[in-house]
Image (cartoon, rainbow, N blue to C red):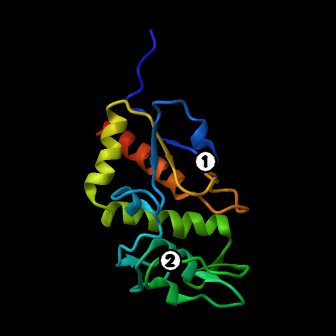
């Protein structure tokens, strides 16, 4: 006798695969183009008061502001990106500043991007948005989550990391933790 899993795991879907999902699939867009309140899950969304890792006392308005502001391009970071709506920063980065350290892309994702994004999920996104995703998973709804990028692999530095993949891991981990009690 097969045992039903305790919750339906959320699934990251690369943007270019969304149109290939079967009819009736629960598809959730969490990009900045999604309707409210799902667009508030975008790293571009202005939440304000987001702590900047490695810079005690510094805050950013967006997750993207943290990521872009800590990029080291031509030897400098750009703290101006901590203010206002999220924006991309041009130029080839040599890494990301984390205190006195210069981190490579993968380590920066692990020590800066993911913790910052998850902090926003826990402290800035309306609790009913996160609770809705978790409740759906706990009630057996498989949610296919996407944003505007295709890379769900934190270890692939050749492409931008999809925040939808980070959200999926967060939802799945939170469901498992709630079930453990």
Disc 2 to disc 1, C-alpha distance: 24 Å
Figure disc tally: 2
Secondary structure, mark 1, is loop
- Locate residue 42, reporting x and y percent: 45, 63
Q: Give the residue drawn at x 27%, y 56%.
A: 127
Of tags 2 and 1, the one toward the viewer is 1
- Locate residue 133, reporting x and y percent: 35, 45
Q: Give the residue drawn at x 47%, y 33%.
A: 25
Q: Seen in the image, is 87 located left or right of residue 173?
A: right
Residue 22, visible in the rendered structure: yes
Residue 97, picture quadrant: bottom right
Q: Give the residue drawn at x 30%, y 40%.
A: 135
Does 104 sit above or below residue 70?
above
Q: Earlier in the sequence, mark 2 or mark 1?
A: 1
Q: Quadrant of the N terminus?
A: top left
Q: Give the residue drawn at x 42%, y 32%.
A: 8
Badge 1 is on which residue? 14
Q: Quadrant of the C terminus?
A: top left
């Amino acid at each position: 006798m097969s045992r039903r899993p305790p919750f339906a795991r959320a699934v990251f879907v690369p943007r270019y695969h969304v149109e290939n999902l079967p009819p009736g699939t629960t598809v959730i867009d969490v990009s900045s183009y999604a309707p409210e309140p799902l667009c508030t899950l975008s790293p571009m969304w202005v939440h304000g008061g987001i702590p900047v890792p490695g810079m005690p006392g510094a805050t950013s308005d967006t997750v993207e502001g943290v990521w872009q502001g800590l990029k080291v391009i031509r030897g400098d970071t750009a703290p101006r990106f901590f203010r206002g709506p999220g924006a991309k920063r041009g130029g080839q980065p040599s890494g990301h500043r984390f205190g006195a350290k210069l981190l490579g892309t993968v380590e920066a994702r692990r020590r800066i991007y993911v913790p910052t994004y998850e902090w926003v999920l826990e402290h800035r996104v309306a609790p009913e948005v996160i609770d809705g995703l978790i409740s759906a998973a706990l009630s057996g709804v498989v949610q296919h989550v996407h944003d505007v990028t295709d890379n769900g692999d934190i270890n692939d530095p050749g492409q931008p990391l999809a925040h939808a993949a980070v959200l999926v891991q967060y939802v799945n981990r939170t469901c498992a933790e709630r079930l453990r009690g």
